[in-house]
Every structure is written in C-alpha cells, then in structure tokens.
Image (cartoon, coloured by chain):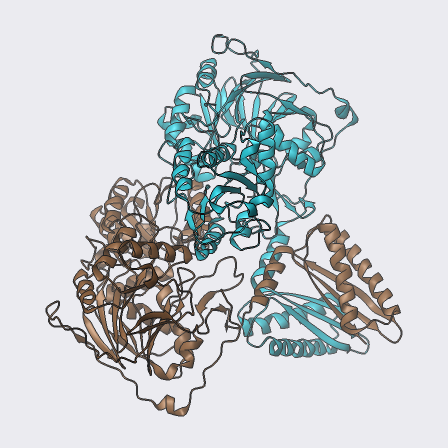
Chain colours: A brown, B cyan
Amino acid sequence: MTVTVEHKRPQITPEDQMEKETFSKPRTRKARGGSRRRGSVERKPDATLKVIPLGGLDAIGKNMTAFECGDDMILVDAGLMFPDDDHPGIDLILPDYTYVLENEHKLRGIIITHGHEDHTGSLPYLMKDLSRKVPIYATKMTLGLVEGKFNEHRVKARLAEVKAGDEIKLGSFVVDFFAVNHSIPGALGVFLQSPAGNVLHTGDFKLDQSPIDGVHTDFGALARFGKMGVDLMMSDSTNAMNPNFTPSEAEVGRALRPIIENAKGRVIIASFASHIHRLQQIADAAVACGRKVVVTGRSMVQNTDIARRLGYLKIQDVDLIDAYDLKDMPADKVVIMCTGSQGEPLSALARIANGEHRTIQIDEGDTVIISATPVPGNEKAVTRVVNSLAKIGCDVYDKRRAMVHVSGHAGAEELKLVLSIVQPKNFMPVHGEATHLRAHAKLAEATGVPARNIFLCENGDTLELTQDGVRFGEPVESGIVYVDGLSVGDTSKDVLDERQTLGGAGVALICAAVDLRKKQIMGHVRVEMRGITGGDVSDLRREATDTVKGTLRRALEKGTKGRDLEKTCRDSLLSLLWERTKQRPMVVSSIIEL
Amino acid sequence: MTVTVEHKRPQITPEDQMEKETFSKPRTRKARGGSRRRGSVERKPDATLKVIPLGGLDAIGKNMTAFECGDDMILVDAGLMFPDDDHPGIDLILPDYTYVLENEHKLRGIIITHGHEDHTGSLPYLMKDLSRKVPIYATKMTLGLVEGKFNEHRVKARLAEVKAGDEIKLGSFVVDFFAVNHSIPGALGVFLQSPAGNVLHTGDFKLDQSPIDGVHTDFGALARFGKMGVDLMMSDSTNAMNPNFTPSEAEVGRALRPIIENAKGRVIIASFASHIHRLQQIADAAVACGRKVVVTGRSMVQNTDIARRLGYLKIQDVDLIDAYDLKDMPADKVVIMCTGSQGEPLSALARIANGEHRTIQIDEGDTVIISATPVPGNEKAVTRVVNSLAKIGCDVYDKRRAMVHVSGHAGAEELKLVLSIVQPKNFMPVHGEATHLRAHAKLAEATGVPARNIFLCENGDTLELTQDGVRFGEPVESGIVYVDGLSVGDTSKDVLDERQTLGGAGVALICAAVDLRKKQIMGHVRVEMRGITGGDVSDLRREATDTVKGTLRRALEKGTKGRDLEKTCRDSLLSLLWERTKQRPMVVSSIIEL
C-alpha cells in the first residue's frame, strides 16, 4: 500500500470548466427481456476502454473504479475505509483519486451502486476537489443517505435518481442499471457499454430468494447482458472464501422472533444503522410481540428517518416511541434499536452498557442482541461491550448463539451461479483483500473462464479492453489519503511512524540554553518525559538531566554547536534511556544558543 | 480492571526466611479407584479455606489462584497475558500477586497445571520477588518449558516433578493430581483437600476420546473425587459459549493428510509452538507423504527440542532436516513447521511471507496451512500475513477451509458432562471473560447446581469455604502489573494515557529562554512538532512559533513567570493547534529563566 502525501490538484483550464456537462435523463427499459439487440453502443475497432480500480482491491473498503474510453470517463463508487491500529490518530482513509482529478474534464458522471460508506464515503471530499458539479447517479435510497452526508459537509451536488431497469447515456457510454439484493435497499449492479466493449459490474450482492423488500437480484438482466456479450465482468469477492450460499435475510427475522417473545425485560438490539431490512424485521417482530420500538444512536435515528420518509422502512407512528418516554413504559414492552454493534466506545450500546446513556438504562435480566458481525479489527471492542453486559447480568445473543445476523454478500456457490449465467469473456474479482480476490479467481476458473482471462489487479492497475481482448496497461497514481482532523492528504507515513514511536515508547525532551562564546550552559537544563516508564520516574528524570548536562558541558568545551550539539545531547539521552528501560522513546533536543 | 502502580514488597522477617519448607515427595496412588476412603485430610469444624483468584477471571490469560487455610497457602498457576492495543508499548501483563508476597511465609508450594504461558508466564517474575525458593510442582513436560523460561531470566528454582495419580502433602493440604486432556501434553487437574473442605480445579481441559498421546481426561478420578465430596469445583470456561463437543485433535490429522498429499510445492504449516500433539500429527503426516520435516522459529525449535528430549514428541532424526539444508531439497519433499500462526510481524511465517527469511523461500503454488485460530485481537495481523501469501500465489488453508485446527478447551456439552460426574456442592467458573463465566454458570445450573451455590467472582474476590458452605469474604489487593521493557509494575495508567495521546495526536514542544528582570525573550523561541499533521507542516510550525513568541512577550510584560508562564504558552499553542488541525496533541512547555 503506497501512501500518497501530496494530494495533487489537477490543472483545470477555463475551457474545461466551461465544458457542457452531458447530463442525460434516464429512460426506463420498456421491453424487458424482449429485445434481442446486440447493444446500444456502436463498436469502434480502434477504441480502448481503460478500467482503473482506484480502491477496493487491497481491503474491503474505499471502493472506486474509473472507466475511461477516449474523452469520456465515468466513476463507479467513491467509498472510504475506516482506519485500524496501523493508522494511529487517523479519522478516515480515502482512495487517492488524483487520476480522476487530473482527468476531470472527461468525467461524465459518478455512479454509486448503493449507500454503504465503503461506496459513498469519499464523495464529499471528491466533490470539494472537483471544480464542477459532476452529476451523481444512484437510487432514491442511496441519494437519501448521500444527501445527508453532503449536508454535514456543506457540499452542494447534482443528484440524479435512477432505478433498476433504467438506461442512461454518459458520453460514449451507455449504462444499464439492474437490481441486486444486498444488506441495504436500493442496491444496483451496472452494465456499461462502450465503443470498445461491455463491462458488467455486479456491485455488492447476494442471491436472497426471499428478500424482505421483495427485490431479487435480477437474474433476467444478468442473462440478457450475458447474451449481449460481457467482455469483462467485475464481481463482489467479499465472501468468495465461504463455501456455501449465504442464508436469506428472512432467517434473521425467524431467529429474532422467539428471542423477543421469550424476553422478560427490555430487548436491546444493536445493528448497522443502514441495514434497513434488518431494522424492518426488528420492528415487525417487536410489534408482533406487543412491544413499542425505540430508536437511539445518531446514525440510527438519521437513517430510520430517511428510510421511513422515502418509503423503504415501514414503521407506524403509533409503534414508535421516543427514548425520553421510556420511563413511562414497562421494560417488557419495548424493543430498543441502537447503534454500537461494532463496540464503538461512544455508541448508544456502549453507553447503555456503561450506564452512561441519558435515557436508556439496563438491568439484570434484560436481553441484548448483537445483530451484526464484528468488522475485522473490531472483535476486541465488541467483546468489551459484551463483557460489560454480561457483568450486569444481561442475556446476550450474538451470531454464535442464534442466527441474529447473516451476511449481505454472496457465498462461493452464488458467485459461481452468477458467473455461469453471465459467462464473461474476462473476469476481474473486486471488493476484497488479496486472499478473497484469489479465491474468487479460482471460482471463476471453475465455471469455465480461462485462467489467462482472469485478472488479479491491484489498486492503480489499468486493464485495457480492446476488440483483441483485455491486457494490463500502464498503472496510474494511486494509494491512500488520510483524513486526519481537518487535514486531508497531509498526513504522511513519517507522521504515522512518529505516532507509532510516541505511542509505543513515549517521548523525552531536552531544552537548554547555552552561550557558545563562553562555552557555558545558561540557566537550568530541562529534561521532560512523557509516556516513559522505568523504575522511579523522578529518579530517572534526575539522572537524565545530569547526563545531558554532562554531555552538553563536554560538547561545549570541544566547540560543538548547532545541530551537532543537539544531536550529541539526544544520543546521550537515548543511550541512557535504553540502558535504564530497554526502550527507545523519541528524543527531541532543543538547544537555544544565546 | 484496576491498575496497580506500586508493586508492594512484602515485609519478610528473618524468622520467615528461616522457616523450614514443607517439601513433600509425591506418592503415587496404588489402588486407583479401589479405595472408598472419605479423604486424606481430617476436617476441622472451625477451619476456613480461602479461595482467592488473582487472575484469569477478567480475560483468558494470567491465571493464578491462591488457596489459603490457616497458616498454609498454595498457589495454582502463575500465568501472564499478552497486551492488546489498549496497552501501548507494554510487553507483558502479570496478575498483581501482592497478596502472595504479603503471605509468602505461608506459601507451601506452587502448582502449575500445564505449560501454556497463561499458566506459567509470571513464574519468573514471582520467583524473583519471593525471598525463598518455593517448590514448583508440575509434570515433566511443564517443568521442561518452565525451566527454559527460568534459564532466560536466570532464575534458579526448585522444580518437583509430579504426574497424574500422584498425591502430595503441602502443609495442611493434600493435593491429588489427575490427567486431563488439553492442547499440550502433561496437563493436570488438581483435587485439593483441606481441613475446611475439598476443591476440585479442572485446569484447562477437553474430553478428547481419541487423544494423540493416549492420555484421556481421567473420568475415574473425577468420579472418585466426586464421591469423596467436592465442596467447590472450579472449571475452565473458555468454550462455555460453544454449544457442542469440541472435536478430537485426531480430526486435524485427518484434515492435514490429504492437503499435504496433494500439495505440489512446499508445505508450510504455522502452529502454536507448544502444541506438541499438533506438531506430532504434522510430522507424522509429512513422513507418511514422503516429506522431510523442517522446524523454524525460535520457540518452535526450542519446544520441539524439549518435547523430543522428554519423549513427548516422536520424530526420528532421519526425518528432520535443518533449514540450512533446504536448498538441496526439492520443494515437494519438505514440510516446514513454523511459528507465526498469530501473524506476529517478526515470526518465521511473516518473514517467509515477506521474503525476509534467511533460509526459507516461498513461491507461487506452495501450500500454507494456518493450523491455529487467531487469538482475539490478532485477526488483522493474521489477515495481513495471509494476504501477503495470497499475493505470492500460495494456496492458503485455514480453519474455515478445512479442519486444520480444533480447540483445546471443552465445549458446553463436555462441561456439563464433567459437572454431572463431579456433582459439586458449589461452583465457580474460571478461565474466561465475564461472558464466558456467565455462560458456564448457566450450564452448571442446568446440571443441577443451585443458583445460590454458583459464584461469579472477579479477580481479588475471596471465597470462604467452611463446613457451613461457601460465601464471599473480604477482597484482597489485585489488579494488573505491566512489564514494560525492564520495568515491572512501574507503568501507571497515566503513562499509558500519555502514550495514547502521543500516539493518537502527536506532541508539540516549546523551548524558550527568558530574562524575567528585563522581561525579554533571550535567543530563539523553538517549537518542535512530532506526529502532528495539518496542511503544510513547516507553515504550521512557523505560525506556532509566532503565536508562542507573542504570548510569551505579553506574559512577560505582565510579570508572569514559572509554571504560569509555561502554562500560558502551552494553552496558546494548544488553541492554535486545535483551530488548525481539530486535534489535541500533547504540548510540553519548557521555559528557562535566566
């Protein structure tokens, strides 16, 4: 993973800025499955389609792919990733989209397949960096969530609603949207036709045969596009290593019902705030058991509002109560839906577990359901919350105890089924770490895609699709960009390394003033230590001060000055600290020459 | 979790030091199962047995329990825990055993149930803190591993070998050892008879019906002790939440064989270095497939040496080759057993994966088996190594893909079975986090132990066992002690908090010299920043220097001095940094008054 420190601004000429945007109104396919046409875009023998993944191939996160053909470019998804312990102090991680900015004049539109943050999260940053309002195409649900983020960031954008079955023209591209089933409503796959060939991008999907909202992954569309000819297929690798079919979301409802029915006290259910199908099932089960629903946690409140307003989530007003009214309700008459399924320390669930929630209390005998699975890296945080709940005496259910969570991504058998329907000429597994991509490649091979036509790419690689097939082209600038407080892209690997050292072993600071002519130390020599341990710390500090003083005096005698003087002091303190603590803290030496 | 900063030294009087140690030779039970005696210890109506868990009840780690009756105390296990991200820079975590040191004069012996570090790891520290060589009782295998650690620490100790079936007398205690089956050979459970009553401690165990070394958990002994009367049972809660029987270790052998048989290149298997049964199965499968065995990784080499020497691991010399001789071997003729199953960055597997291993290389088509499960918190590290291997093109097997690992701890059904055999009067789940202990308590209740006789304890709690039953007594000093470089117990929560701040947001340092009488700044004002980000860092530094200079000048005018002067400067820099970066780094201000 390369770290891009400089976040280059593209040079946009006034002409580019004046360029007329090709904003096409979507038209809905009338004769679904009826027509047998070979595509809406005329093939050009010398055309090349570049497929450039800018994110999503090194991790499950920050998905973004550019498709470029001649003077036209479209972007599919603009996601972010949440940092782990390797990125101390970092708030968010974005894909480096320098290439998009450098080619902004070509950019005809941004397609967002669904509303998860690993597909939408870098949009506000990208929109700020673009010099014009490139239109964003997505479903009503996705746009609702994106709009919320834009409002927080005070970003204005052009949002264009599309739905499954729509076809739009973006420059020389024709884009068809088809329904896929995922752990959020309004998820789409896209079929891109270009003068150089056709690409099918599944988006994130599973093949739920009994979906909560009745929206199936559109097998008919997959078959139709397959028949039209898919030169390159890109498909979701998240669960490529899971040998089975992912269970239906409906199974979760079946598991939740008896738990809520048999619960004696409060029922508190933590889930992903964007998992509207899950929230629908929780609400349905609550109402069926004669309980009212309470929603708590900022993103949960926000998303249920949006989803109810847009008609994706159906909870009647009479079944919802405000958290402030909980005190008037018997404990066994409520189900509390909350955030915190990842153990986030400031989330509603963590605050409830620690007795720090303003309106919701928890008692022995209450039931807590973790209706989610920990994202890798969050296991310990989740365990911490569960242990707090266990100490209170709550009955905690998680995935291990009952099927209170299922994945939103297709398992190996589903992936093979879709590959078999589409029968792509070339295949590129996406949305996964190296190990997932490789497993998905094996699946593609098993369904008959020749190994030489399967492309294991890294972020920044370019695949070039021409009438002669697919091959690797020149890689483009890529990497990751840190959002760190107010700063975007300024945090370098060096800064992170400094934080790792500081966080692991602490810091020692030397401050002294010297008169170089008199070869004298002026005033006190100060050594300060933070995050350093080693016997009695004040003893250690005294010894450190003496050591530095001695070194400084000898160095002054020899006529050492400037950086050399500072380095000599730093080195002597470092050796002392290593000897006394067997650790290597950071040592910073400031010597003022009077 | 409380953090004990001061690691109190007990006051040992010369008399205590001269006290004769009661070192009893074990005698092996002759008439196993035959005798029907009601115990070897005479009950005293006024005797009280205190059971004091000092570790192991807040986490899977640092197990240690003190048993105290009158003037006699014995300790069962002395383990450590490995730190996670909540403990930046910490090397190891020990239980706070102040109570043991304060009662050193009573300590008759230390019993180690088996050789895992969460049961043995604090022994070297404890031995250094004790003023005399308290004898350590354990099996040959356990003592072999303990001895290795003692040699590293240059600690001398009295090691007393016992084996399953032995009975020893320690003060007024009589201790019977019985065989249990676990993921390391030579694991024991203990049955303690005291004048106040009997305690059965299972140690870590599972009920493997086809154990690799033929050693079963001794059902006969459990039944016999049950019949003699178990007033309190303490049992391993690790897998209390797993509803099933843990599969037999033999299943792993069955899974490994076809993978090795079908592998085309090298086979590299990472496992726990102490899992001798696993290593035996790997070696057996390798030899059966006509491959030689290579052992690499410091602890793996060390443990296989000890286990072969003591007869626990049977690999013939002819089947072992040195890593240096690998270059002369065809890749498909070797199986490499290595450390690194937890993704440790410096382990053999990580070095192999990164091409940094001195003697072992890895190529596309080689097979890697992760014959372990990630300890919670290590998931990301393991994933990182697996992804590196996937990028090389290795075929990686883990638990999800084949049964290449099984747990060494009993599942819920096994736990209930043992509870049913022993039929204890009182029960205390041990070896687990709050959620495991609670789950185990429910299992005990299900087998008929009355809820009021089940004790969910925390570290430092005291259970008092008398002829009237069990009740909570006064808690003792407990907590955790950090090993941090050379320092043991000096690292405070404050130091860790400092490291968290430093690691998350960096540090800024102010260094200046002033003349208070002249109200003047002397020489340059220096501001240094480390781990801080925010636009152009040199711009920020310049602005910070100007801000501090201005503040300092105004404060001098007002006659501010000393700590107030430093605080004023610190505050002004903190506000500037918050404004510019929206982060709160640590700011240290040193102002030299001339």
Q: Quadrant of the N terminus of chain B?
A: top right
| Along the viewing direction, whichever of A226 and A66 lies nearer the viewer | A226
B585 to the left or right of A571 = left
Up the image or down, B229 lies above or below B526; here it is: above
Up the image or down, A463 lies above or below B292; here it is: below
Q: Is residue A188 visible?
A: yes
Q: Is residue B449 visible?
A: no
Number of marks in the rendered image:
0
Residue A69 screen position, x and y as percent:
32, 79
B173 to the left or right of A220 = right
**Which corner quadrant of the image does residue A66 belong to?**
bottom left
**Which corner quadrant of the image does residue B462 belong to?**
top right
Q: Quadrant of the C terminus of chain B?
A: bottom right
Residue A583 screen position, x and y as percent:
68, 53
Residue A582 screen position, x and y as percent:
70, 50
Residue A197 screen position, x and y as percent:
26, 73
**Which corner quadrant of the image does residue A559 belong to?**
bottom right
B485 to the left or right of A594 = left
| Along the viewing direction, whichever of A215 and B332 lies nearer the viewer | B332
| Along the viewing direction, whichever of A263 and B406 lies nearer the viewer | B406
